Structures are given as C-alpha cells and as structure tokens.
Image (cartoon, grey):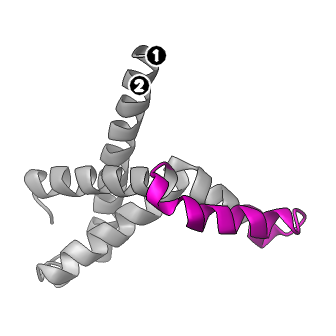
Amino acid sequence: MISIPELALLAFAGYRCTQLAIHDTILDPARAVVFDWHSRNTDSRARTAAVTLISCPYCIGWWIAGLLLATWLLVTGQFEQAPLLVHAVEWFAVAGAAVLLNRLDDTLSEVGR
C-alpha cells in the first residue's frame, strides 16, 4: 500500500498532468485535431467519447491517476505487495485528491477574476 507522502506526490502529479491535458497550450494542436475529427462526424459515439474525455478534467484525471499509480507501483516494486482491491482503492484516493486540487485551482482562479 502506498504511503501518505506517496499519495500526495501522485495527487500533485495527477493534478498537473490533468492541467496539461485539458488546459495547457502545448497540447492545443493535439486537442484541435481531435475536435476537428469529431466535427466531421458529430453522430459518432466514439468521437464524442474522445472529445468528452479530453475536455473533462474528471474523466481524463481518472485515467491519468490510474496510469500514474500503476507506473509508480510497478517502478517501485510495490505492485505485488498488495491485492488488486487495495490498488483500486489507492486509485480512487489518488484520483480524488487530484480532483480536489483541480477544484481548488478552479475556485481560486474564479475568485481572482
């Protein structure tokens, strides 16, 4: 099981990666390609799902948290030390903490306007 400092580190990494995927200008060209692809066939469920995924911080944040956690567990050799159910709970914890950071960021940016 991951420790509290590891949870915090993964949450901050998840928050930052989610911001990168959703808002940062460096990925604007990639997002534009997906939006353009969707606009050519808006009835496609797969295309709509892809646009939803890259537009929603909760959606993409969930998968980013899972990737970060899996990578962390495999690289540190902790994956085999706990049952999958424990890792599933860790995934919820990392994703939840990252989303709290996203919400805090959104709230503070609206207060500053």
Question: Of the residues shown, which amino acid type is indicated by label 2?
Answer: Ser
**Looking at the picture, how far across and down is residue 45, in whole percent?**
81, 68
Query: Identity of the amino acid at label 1?
Result: Arg
Q: Which residue is mark 1?
A: 113
Residue 19 within the segment the image draws in magenta = no
Location of the N terminus (image quadrant)? bottom left
Residue 23: give x, y in percent of width and height: 49, 48
Front residue of this view, candidates 78 and 86: 78
Q: Residue 109 got which mark?
A: 2
Please report the residue visible at 41 percent of the width from the left and 50 percent of the height from the top.
Answer: 19
Does residue 6 sit above or below 102 in this rendering?
below
Range of the magenta residues? 23-48
The answer, for residue 41, to whether it is visible in the render is yes
Q: Is residue 63 left or right of residue 92?
A: right
From the viewer's perspective, tell me whether residue 55 is left or right of residue 99.
right
Residue 50 visible? The answer is: no
Which percent across, then down, holds residue 31? Answer: 60, 62
Dots 2, 1 in contact, CB < 8 A:
yes
Classify mark 2: helix, strand or loop. helix
Q: Nearer the viewer, residue 101 or 4?
A: 101
Q: Is residue 29 magenta?
A: yes
Q: Position of residue 43 (x, y in %)?
A: 90, 64
33 relative to 64 in the view: left or right: right
